[in-house]
Image: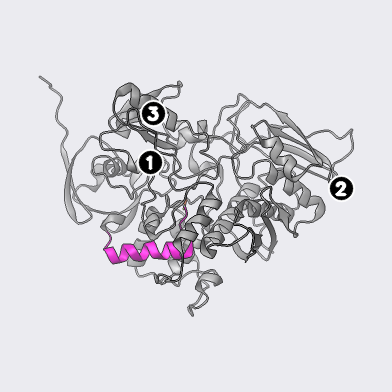
Amino acid sequence: MNDEPRPKNLVFELNGQPVQVADVGDTLLGVLRGELRVRSVKDGCSPQGQCGCCTVLVDGEPRVACVTPARRVAGRSVTTVEGLEPERAERWGTRFCETGGSQCGFCTPGIVMRLEALERKGVARNDIARNDDVARNDDVARNDTAPVDQALLAHLCRCTGWQTIKDAWAHDGTRSESRDLDAASRRGTLEGGAPQLVSPEVALGAGGFAADTAPDGALIAVPNGTGEWSLGTSLQAARAAAGKVQGRRTTAEHRWPIELPDDGGRPWAFTLQTTWVEPGYLETDAAWCEPGGEPASPLANGGAFGGKVDSIVGRAARMLADQHERPVLALFSREDVVRWGPKRPPVAAGIRADGTGTIVIADAPGVEAAIAAVAPDLTVELVDLDGPTCSSAIRAAGWAEALVLSQAVNGVNGWITAPNGSAAKASVSDGVITIGVRCGEVLDAVVLRSYCIGAAHMAYSWVTSEALTVDDQGEVHDLTIRSFGIVRAIDMPRVEVELVEDDQPAVNGSDAVFAAVAGAVWAHHGFAPRWPTGTDGMMSP
Ligand code: FES
């Protein structure tokens, strides 16, 4: 006979209906995604409480579910995207889809709930500074960014660069009849480097993520730090079995792990040292598999910018499903992504005034060829570093750095050409980043613009703010998603985009934008020899 006391029940209202669950000490996120199978509420960093993907309304107030104990909502009312009136949900989906405020869509349901709370409080949708392209026909004032910027402080988005989310807030919810969402999805797929669906439903959480589509009853497997996986019937149980404490913060300093190359004692015209950078995608690696089946892709709707190309979760899910003869969902936590996911390789480089020079870069298969494709006058030296794995699949790895150096000697305002033939230019003036991009048939201006702004955000953030702390033994110290330095909405300069249509086949354009903006921001920061340069208000005129 089992003498264990049976857990008490917890009763609360979910989306207008009473629900009862066992009180086993889980978080609200664990209960919503686990027992109650609510899929719009995403887990981007639990239990860190830093990304906002799991934001829900508790008695009408936005709450981050991964740091809210479930028992705290006893007797209260919880609302998720699924509980919005259908017309309101559709309107939110349309607002994000029509503005490009959602790409992979992983962060969006949490942001929708945050903005829903803002709207319910009576904050008018015109209380922001909006992008002229999207809101040019609106005659409202555009001088108060405070409410939305404040609201977005609790969130992270890796794809959109924030501006299009603010556009979504400002949008009136009218769907464009003439827009071709198939063409939009084709453009999204080119830019994201993985199949991407563009639709209002994606913004409401239906991006088809593996952690959402795993079959009922699948075991959950998490890495336990010994090279093995720990399994449980819930995420809470799997993590307990792994015995892990999530979310350590660091007090260690960044370091630049590669010495500058020597040019026979002569000074270089420009030098640059970077450190490891975490891709920082919001949807952590996840894949599920039936015994004897093919694993679901960890890239359901794009969004990782090369970060999951070689993810191990699919192979793990297949192996464990065969071993346990039942479906298994293999899932990384945020900390797992930081520890074991690939990073942008650090460089140390010097370039002469004639464009020749040397770039020393952490070894990653393919990175030497990527640099040679855009900068044949640079000598490439590969080094092995103690530290996390580096990958040339990360957005423009190596070749963006080479183009940035070339821009330093050739001038930063001209067009640069990416290995795929796309071209971009960027400039920084009066606190605004201005971009031009030419990448074949535009296909869908909303999506291409969104990707360009997202690339500008990623580049600006990389040059000024982002780095991953790795100690002398190669151990990663920054394990929380806020510790990488991703620039927040409130700190992001405005971006203006010119899309140049041409009659060539459509190719990815945002990677070229990424390189061009990095060069322009670096120039604006006086070609500081180490990244991150620090923001320090340097975008001000
Ligand atoms: Fe925000 Fe992808 S749309 S993280």
Magenta residues (range): 84-103
The numbered mark, 3 or 1, whose residue comes first in the sequence reads 1
- One can see residue 100 in this view: yes
Q: Could you tell me which quadrant the C terminus lies in?
A: bottom right
Q: Which residue is mark 3?
A: 318
- Circle 3 SS class: helix
Question: How far across and how far down the image is residue 131, in percent?
Answer: 54, 69
Q: Is residue 519 above or below residue 239?
A: below
Disc 1 or disc 2, which is closer to the eye? Answer: 1
Q: Quadrant of residue 235?
A: top left
- One can see residue 147 in this view: no
In three-dimensional space, the C-alpha distance between marks 3 and 2, rounded to whole angstroms, equals: 53 Å
Viewed as shown, does residue 399 lie left or right of 65?
Answer: right
Q: Which residue is mark 1?
A: 210
x 19%, y 49%: residue: 12
The numbered mark, 3 or 2, whose residue comes first in the sequence reads 3
x 46%, y 64%: residue: 180
Check residue 324 for magenta coloring: no
Disc 3 or disc 1, which is closer to the eye? Answer: 3
